[in-house]
Image (cartoon, grey):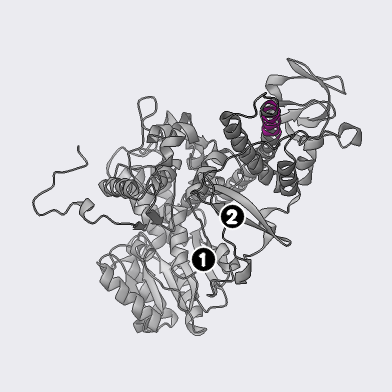
């Protein structure tokens, strides 16, 4: 009961309001519904969930009560940052709008964690700078399942979607991203030397704690006037970008999370002075921090001044990145430092990159100092972005790039920028190769899923047809479920390369090992050699070159392709299916990929209303040559019964 309290005589119970609809604006503020669960007696490193939030728990209980009164509906969430660090945040976000997680067996955060997180003992960097071993989230699994769960309850729109949808009617200029690398001044280099030495042997507390060292290294770059002295290349670059906006009739927004309170001695004041020295009128600049603008009213007044043109340049702290509409004539978005989360970077850009900005294009600028702490921060943010991209990609699993090793941290703090750049390039190349390998396996797994589902459906259909007194209710339920699964598998295959769809006709026996097919005529790469399979036994592969490969070693195989010889083809995996279903599946398999469908139609006569079915499903709708995806929500029962005679 630590997260609740007893009502008083003056409290109005939530039930008294009895809302028909409950909408959570900025729903990411309710993400920490429960504390991260333990694994083997301690919380895994890189789990990404903080302490339990009373505000989130209160919202969760109100949402559950509202859905109970509205037949499972009536709760909605709106957010631009649905998740940042962990699959747990996806589960918490879904719990606000649906009770379906229970039916998937996801009754607690621990179940969600075990289903979607790969946890292993891993070498990690401790806060004191040392290293140790601790259970850590080293990767993610079953992401296709998680994405399918999200698809049932999440409508996701991004800037590209809005730009393609012609019905919105508000322009969204293209966003150009730039990375500017700045040289350290002699004063900054001199200050960095002792800090690097201290970082190699940090203390457990005080000014030589690792976090204190990192903070000083940041301030040498952001605000040298107050720390190490000398010029401020970052302020000069930001002022030059703002001046470009001023001279072309546009506006600029600069973001800095670690700039102080906005007073005369803060970094914000130093950047304001740099703007003025560059030629921008001081009356055109406004600094926005939690101290200068402590409440929503004062920030909305600043937004109005910016929109009306009284202020044309904003230098703001973290309070600026959410809740403000600053798109009017904004041209330059300047990141003076990096936030901890990539979604916060998107939120910053979203202040100016919004519908209705009349600028021809918008520029987002990252200012990074060579050989500085910026390298570690940039790698960290891009690593988190990598996991979010995994969640949106077609892969079923992926390594967690957030999990830094101790040796990585040491290299990123090196004084030689070339070492840092070479390391990041090597990391990117290795990650790209791993993603390609995972994608290759994921595509073959989709082929296996289709073939297995078609076999099950064909067998169950024949069994139902062979019953003396006709199909049973269990037959109908199983056939309806398998038919839906086969449609989904066909849609997945339709988006893959033709070689994977051609595999459906492969007539040679295939043995599936670690989501990869092996059989006569199959070509694979193992180590540095390429082989053609002659036969598969219970323990090994026999190749045409006479080399035997142990089946346990095939997880290292890459570039698996089927034989190009036509004599190896001729299978008909759809034989034995009901004719109507077979025609539907064949149409799905030859349909163009989803992304090639183009924007939604503008004409109202091409917008259709479909009768809902028993469970929420995704369908493909053809209107002439146009292919549309349709999500149909449940109200009416659906019954599948095999037609007499097949």
Q: Which residues are magenta?
A: 451-463
Q: Which residue is mark 2?
A: 630
- The image shows residue 71 at horizontal and vertical percentages of 37, 48
Residue 523 lies in what quarter of the image?
top right
Horizontal side of 485 relative to 539 (left or right) equals left
Disc 2, SS: strand
Q: Residue at x 48, y 46 (%)?
A: 413
Checking the image for residue 613, the label placed there is none
Is residue 456 magenta-colored?
A: yes
In the displayed image of the protein, which residue is found farthest to the top? Answer: 538
> Dot 1 surroundings within 10 Å: few (below 14), some, or many (20 or more)?
many
161 relative to 304 in the view: left or right: right
> Magenta stretch: dominant SS?
helix
Label drawn at residue 365: 1
* Residue pictured at 30% horizontal, 71% vertical: 299
Q: Position of residue 258 (x, y in %)?
A: 35, 59
Question: Is label 2 or label 1 in front?
Answer: 2
Q: Earlier in the sequence, mark 2 or mark 1?
A: 1
């Amino acid at each position: 009961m630590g997260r609740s309290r007893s009502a008083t005589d003056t409290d109005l119970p939530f039930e008294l309001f009895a809302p028909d609809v409950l909408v959570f604006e900025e729903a990411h503020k309710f993400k920490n519904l429960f504390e991260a669960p333990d694994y083997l007696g301690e919380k895994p490193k890189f789990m990404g969930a903080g302490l339990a939030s009373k505000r989130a728990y209160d919202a969760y209980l109100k949402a559950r009560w509202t859905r109970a009164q509205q037949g499972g509906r009536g709760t909605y969430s709106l957010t631009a940052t649905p998740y940042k660090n962990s699959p747990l945040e996806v589960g918490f976000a879904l719990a606000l709008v649906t009770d379906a997680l229970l039916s998937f067996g996801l009754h607690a955060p621990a179940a969600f964690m075990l289903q979607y997180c790969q946890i292993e003992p891993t070498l990690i960097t401790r806060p004191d700078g040392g290293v140790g071993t601790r259970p850590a989230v080293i990767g993610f699994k079953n992401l296709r399942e998680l994405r399918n769960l999200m698809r049932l309850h999440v409508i996701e729109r991004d800037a590209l979607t809005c730009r393609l949808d012609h019905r919105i009617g508000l322009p969204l200029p293209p966003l150009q991203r730039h990375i500017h690398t700045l040289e350290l001044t002699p004063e900054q280099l001199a200050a960095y030397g002792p800090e690097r030495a201290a970082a190699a042997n940090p203390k457990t507390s005080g000014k030589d704690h690792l976090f204190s060292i990192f903070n000083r290294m940041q301030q040498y770059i952001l605000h040298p006037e107050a720390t190490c002295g000398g010029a401020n290349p970052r302020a000069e670059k930001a002022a030059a970008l703002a001046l470009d906006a001023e001279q072309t009739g546009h506006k600029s927004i600069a973001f800095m999370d670690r700039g102080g309170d906005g007073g005369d001695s803060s970094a914000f004041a130093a950047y304001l002075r740099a703007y003025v020295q560059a030629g921008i009128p001081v009356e055109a600049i406004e600094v926005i921090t939690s101290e200068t603008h402590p409440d929503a009213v004062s920030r909305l007044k600043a937004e109005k001044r910016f929109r009306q043109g009284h202020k044309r340049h904003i230098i703001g702290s973290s309070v600026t990145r959410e809740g403000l509409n600053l798109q009017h004539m904004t041209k330059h978005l300047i990141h003076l430092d990096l936030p901890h989360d990539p979604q916060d970077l998107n939120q910053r850009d979203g202040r100016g990159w919004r519908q209705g900005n009349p600028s021809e294009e918008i520029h987002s600028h990252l200012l990074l100092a060579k050989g500085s702490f910026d390298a570690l921060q940039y790698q960290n943010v891009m690593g988190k972005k990598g996991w979010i991209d995994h969640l949106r990609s077609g892969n079923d699993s992926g390594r967690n790039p957030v999990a830094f090793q101790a040796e990585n941290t040491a290299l990123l703090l090196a004084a030689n920028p070339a070492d840092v750049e070479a390391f990041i390039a090597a990391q990117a190349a290795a990650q790209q190769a791993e993603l390609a390998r995972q994608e290759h396996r994921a595509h073959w797994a989709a082929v296996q899923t289709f073939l297995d589902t078609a076999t099950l459906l064909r067998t169950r259909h024949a069994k139902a047809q062979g019953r003396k007194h006709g199909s049973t209710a269990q037959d109908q339920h199983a056939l309806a479920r398998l038919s839906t699964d086969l449609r989904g598998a066909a849609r997945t295959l339709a988006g893959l390369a033709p070689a994977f769809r051609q595999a459906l006709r492969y007539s040679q026996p295939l043995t599936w090992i670690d989501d990869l097919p092996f059989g006569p005529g199959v070509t694979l790469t193992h180590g540095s050699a390429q082989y053609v399979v002659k036969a598969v036994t219970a323990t090994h592969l026999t190749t045409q070159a006479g080399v035997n490969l142990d089946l346990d070693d095939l997880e290292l195989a890459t570039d698996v392709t089927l034989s190009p010889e036509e004599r190896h083809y001729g299978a008909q995996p759809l034989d034995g299916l009901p004719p109507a279903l077979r025609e539907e599946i064949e149409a799905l398999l030859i349909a163009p990929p989803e992304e090639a469908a183009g924007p939604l139609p503008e004409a109202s006569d091409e917008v259709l209303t479909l009768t809902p079915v028993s469970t929420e499903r995704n369908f493909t709708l053809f209107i002439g040559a146009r292919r549309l995806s349709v999500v149909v929500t449940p109200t009416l029962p659906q019954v599948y019964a095999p037609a007499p005679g097949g």
